[in-house]
Image (cartoon, rainbow, N blue to C red):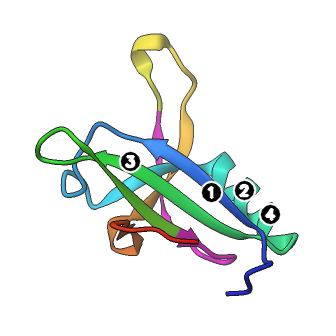
Amino acid sequence: YAVDQPIRLELKSRRTYINDYPSQYIGQNKIRKANEWIEKGHRIFFCWTLTKNNNERELYIGEHKQGDTYEEKLSGNYVRNDKTDKLFLFPNDKLKLITSFSF
């Protein structure tokens, strides 16, 4: 990784535990925009804050690379009469729990 290489982070927050589902949702629009940034030389990371057993939060991060493919799903909030959106399932095995951070 080049220190001067720009990065982009997309932060999502969920009230679920990491093991509740085998993957995390990310919108098709986020993947499309991420690929545009990759074309411009950026590295892309998707981050999720997820619930821990004691209702604290944990931060997980996964890198998206050009050409990565994901399982697709249609979803929407039908209670609010939202339109259906295409979502991608970002697999949990691509996520890393962040326990420390330094510059």
Q: Farthest residue in the top direction?
A: 80
Q: Which residues are magenta?
A: 63-75
Please give left or right for residue 68 compared with residue 33 in the image. Answer: left
Mark 3 vs 1, N-terminal side: 1
In this view, the mark in front (4 or 2): 4
The quadrant of the rendering that contains the C terminus is bottom right
Mark 4 vs 1, N-terminal side: 1
Amino acid type shown at disc 2: Arg
In this view, the mark in front (2 or 3): 3
Label 3 secondary element: strand
Residue 36, picture quadrant: bottom right
Q: Which residue is mark 3?
A: 49
Q: Farthest residue in the right direction?
A: 40
Give coordinates of residue 13: x percent, y percent. 42, 40
Please give left or right for residue 7 compared with residue 26 in the image. Answer: right
Amino acid type shown at disc 3: Thr
Please give left or right for residue 91 compared with residue 43 in the image. Answer: left
Q: Spatial distance from mark 3 to mark 4, Cα to Cα? A: 23 Å
Q: Residues within 10 Å of mark 2 (few under 14, many from 20)?
A: few
Is residue 71 found inside the magenta-colored segment of the image?
Answer: yes
Q: Residues within 10 Å of mark 4 (few under 14, many from 20)?
A: some
Q: Residue at x 50, y 14 (%)?
A: 81
Q: Spatial distance from mark 4 to mark 2, Cα to Cα? A: 9 Å
Mark 3 vs 4, N-terminal side: 4
**Badge count:** 4
Label 2 secondary element: helix
Q: Which residue is mark 2?
A: 32
In this view, the mark in front (2 or 1): 1
Amino acid type shown at disc 1: Leu
Q: Which residue is mark 4?
A: 37
